[in-house]
Amino acid sequence: MRTQLVALVGLLTLPLQAAPPTYTPQLQARIFDRAWSLVSKHYWDRSRTGESWADARDHFRPLAIAAHDRPAFYTILGEMLASLGDSHVYAIDPVQIAIGKARDAGRSEQGFGLSMLPNDDGRWLVMRVTPGSAAAQAGVQIGWEVKSVNGNPVDIDYQPQEGDRARFDFTDEHGAHHPLSLTAAPEAARPVRRATHLDGDILFVGLDGFDPGADRWLAREIADGPPPRGIILDLRGNDGGDADVIAKVAGLFFADDRPLVRRIERRENVQKVRGTGARAYLGPLAVLVGPDSASGAEAVAALIDESGRGTTIGERTAGALTGASEYPLPDGGELSVAEFDIRTPDGRRLEGVGLQPQIAIKPSLADLRAGRDPVLDRALAALRNGQLAAGRHLGVGG
């Protein structure tokens, strides 16, 4: 998934392991040509990498070579890659790779207590405000637009030190401006795996990625204590991950083997879920999804949806489901190329469309600002009232 689009959840204070190279027209030409050639060679849909792809090269190459710095170069390269219209064809520059690796390693982070994402028209909107943070104390609200930081457009490379002050220019939904000065402070990273036992013997599991070990962790959480009366699997912040881990996580909810996705390359291949037999959890299951549920999260939700194994609740997913490999670029950057298309077990294509959950609920702006979660509330109500059937009653496994 396109993790480079996320900014300012928490910002690293430690120096990057290696400085990026000096960007020259010669280096930019090498990076551009390698990226173009890799897509031409490996992209799954050959009908889209012929004459039109050559035209894209001819249009974007001189612009990329003339770019005045790394961000400008990667912006132009990204525009060419985006012309294919595939969620898994993109490039990440070396600075963003280093920031991501440092964050994944759990290094200290400094931030202002807010996270933001660009919407479809490129405006950066506040998506989360950490309680008690500088942003919360200053009155920053979810849904505000970030117009500038220190008088400049949003820069995802910006790394404040503890105690640094930054001038934010916010605009609310009514068009009013809110210039605020915020001070950076240490921030705890949001855990990518979260498990909580809720009233009524319901296990709530938040899983924000399918990284190695996630399946073993989830199996332990399910096996810890008496079998839960119901499970809520929250994939609203999950943008995919390792294909084998995705299949193993899904397999925890099925006793028997079954297709997870159908991979379309030069011929069709089926990736299977390996059922876990008597160890499978076959009780009531709710899967929470939303606009940030992408890639493997969409595959798991579609499997649960189509098989009748559980109930999907929330908002339409991202529609970002093709299969990619990553290739190094000459400057230390990385290129993702979709090498196969993906269909659900029933043959549906979710790329560019997304999965509409069985129970559609969209939190209002007032809900988000008040910390209410109507999606979770609806799942809890359904489980506690016995409205969600268990797998054994639906002919899945056992």
Image (cartoon, rainbow, N blue to C red):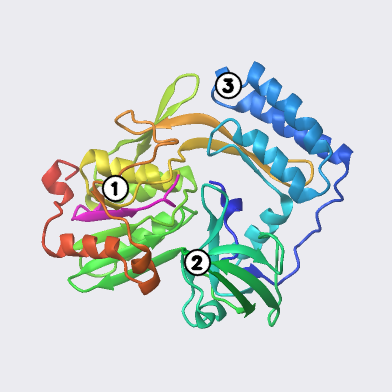
The image shows residue 101 at horizontal and vertical percentages of 64, 59
Q: Is residue 143 above or below residue 295?
A: below
Left or right position of 364 against 53: left
Task: Name the foreground residue: 244 vs 301.
Answer: 301
Question: Which mark's residue is nearer the viewer, 2 or 1?
Answer: 2
The amino acid type found where label 2 is placed reads Asp
* Residue 256: numbered disc: none
* Residue receiving disc 2: 172
Residue 152 in view: yes
Secondary structure beneath disc 2? Answer: loop
* Residue receiving disc 3: 48
The first of marks 2 and 1 along the sequence is 2
Residue 328 in view: no
Residues under numbered marks 2 and 1 in contact, where contact means CB atoms less than 8 Å apart: no
Q: Is residue 194 above or below residue 268?
A: below
Please tell me which residue is depicted at 35% across the width and 68% down the height of the picture. 366
- The boundaries of the magenta stretch are 279-294
Q: Main secondary structure of the magenta part?
A: loop
The amino acid type found where label 1 is placed reads Thr
The image shows residue 335 at horizontal and vertical percentages of 66, 40
Q: Is residue 50 above or below residue 126?
A: above
* Residue receiving disc 1: 276
